[in-house]
Image (tube, grey):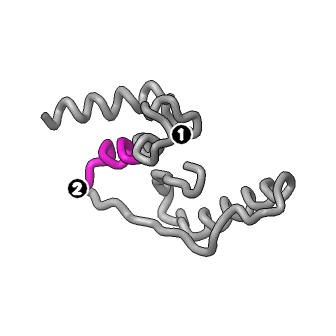
Amino acid sequence: MPDHLHALLEGQEDRSDFQKFAAMIKQRTSFAYRRVSETQLWQEGYYDRVLRDDEPIPDVIRYIIANPARAGLVVDPGEYPFWGSGVYSREELVEFIAVKTDRHR
């Protein structure tokens, strides 16, 4: 998305700290961005939402992947080059949400 970021994150340890993570990401990306632009990359603050155990993760992944199409940036979410995972390939994610959708029908 050209004006915001969606991310699905999972802490791996009890000491995982989302606020520190968000501050670090914003600081490091802002530093790199200032090398090529004089504009500000991030606004103050952010919006976060904690998933509950009963919330289906495939629905969240589906929402994130489909966001560029909903915004009119692409027709098919697969056309948008700026989504992915550090753990799964794009193909695995598309297959994962398709399989989970079929099971809920």
Residue, disc 1: 83
Q: Secondary structure at mark 1?
A: loop
- Distance, label 2 to label 1, CA atoms, is 25 Å
The image quadrant that residue 46 belongs to is bottom right
Tag 2: amino acid: Asp
Q: Residues within 10 Å of mark 1 (few under 14, many from 20)?
A: some
Would you place residue 93 above or below residue 14 in this image?
Answer: above
Give the dominant element type of the magenta stretch: helix, strand or loop: helix
Q: Is residue 66 left or right of residue 21?
A: left
The number of callouts visible is 2
Q: Which residue is found at the position 27% from the left and 48% from the top?
A: 56
User: In the rendering, at what x and y percent does residue 85 appear?
Assistant: 52, 39
User: In the rendering, at what x and y percent does residue 14 appear?
Assistant: 48, 63
Nearer to us of marks 2 and 1 is 1
Residue, disc 2: 54
Would you place residue 49 above or below residue 80 in this image?
Answer: below
Viewer-nearest residue: 13 or 77: 77
Q: Is residue 96 left or right of residue 82?
A: left
* Sooner in the amino-acid sequence: mark 2 or mark 1: 2
Residue that extends furthest to the right in the rendered view of this protein: 35
Q: Which residue is found at the position 72% from the left and 56% from the top?
A: 29
Residue that extends furthest to the front in the rendered view of this protein: 72
What is the number of the mark on residue 50? none
Q: Which span is picked out in magenta?
A: 54-63
